[in-house]
Amino acid sequence: MSTPIAKSPMPSPAPAPSTQSAFRIRRARRGDAEALATLLKEAGYPEGSDTQTVHWVTSHPEIEIFVACDSQDRPVGMLSLSHRPQLRLRGRIATVDELVVTESWRRRGVGRALLLHAIERSRVLSVKRLELASRQDAGSESARFYEACGFVSDSMVFRHEGR
């Protein structure tokens, strides 16, 4: 699995299509726990999340969750962004931990708008590099989407489950 990273300096992806007016982006709130769990399940994480974890993450100083909401303020997409200092970069690094858009809202600019929001937030935080890991292979639809948003694939991710 490769880890796409934003090119340096962080690019400005093309603007989202004009359908963007059909949704807005805001920070996640504690009351979004059920909607976030549903989105995570749709992304392939069968256990989703729980209210306690959502409360913990939404109050953590180095993690931000942004949700795209429909006209009735129901989350239709989410992006989780973590950021922290890193020695080798002599500054902050940020990671898109989760990005998911519900099926009925895909191809309407929601994912791109969420990534644009994360890129802009990374600039505000003076992040040296923005990364994301994808469970999809190079050449997949997801990989092409990330590349169209200015990310490049550059490494493998190794994981230790700690069990």
Image (cartoon, helix red, strand yellow):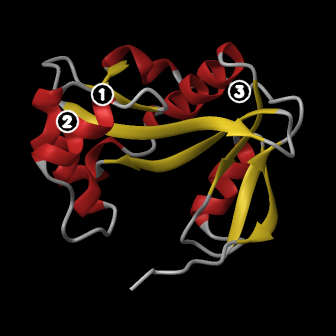
Q: Position of residue 76 (x, y in %)?
A: 26, 37
Q: Identity of the amino acid at label 1? A: Ser
- State left or right for residue 89 relative to residue 147: right
Residue mark closest to the camera, 1 vs 3: 1
Q: Are marks 1 and 2 in contact (CB under 8 Å)?
A: yes
Q: In terms of secondary structure, where does tag 3 sit?
A: loop
The C terminus is located in which quarter? bottom left
Extreme residue in the bottom direction: 163
Q: Which mark is residue 14?
A: 3
Q: Quadrant of residue 112?
A: top right
Comes first in the chain, label 1 or label 3: 3
User: Which residue is located at x 62 percent, y 36 percent?
Assistant: 84
Instruction: Give the alpha-carbon distance from disc 1 to disc 2, as whole Å.
Output: 6 Å
User: Which residue is located at x 64 percent, y 76 percent?
Assistant: 137
Q: Position of residue 69 (x, y in %)?
A: 26, 25
Q: Quadrant of residue 86?
A: top right
Q: Identity of the amino acid at label 2? A: His
Name the residue that disc number 2 marks.
55
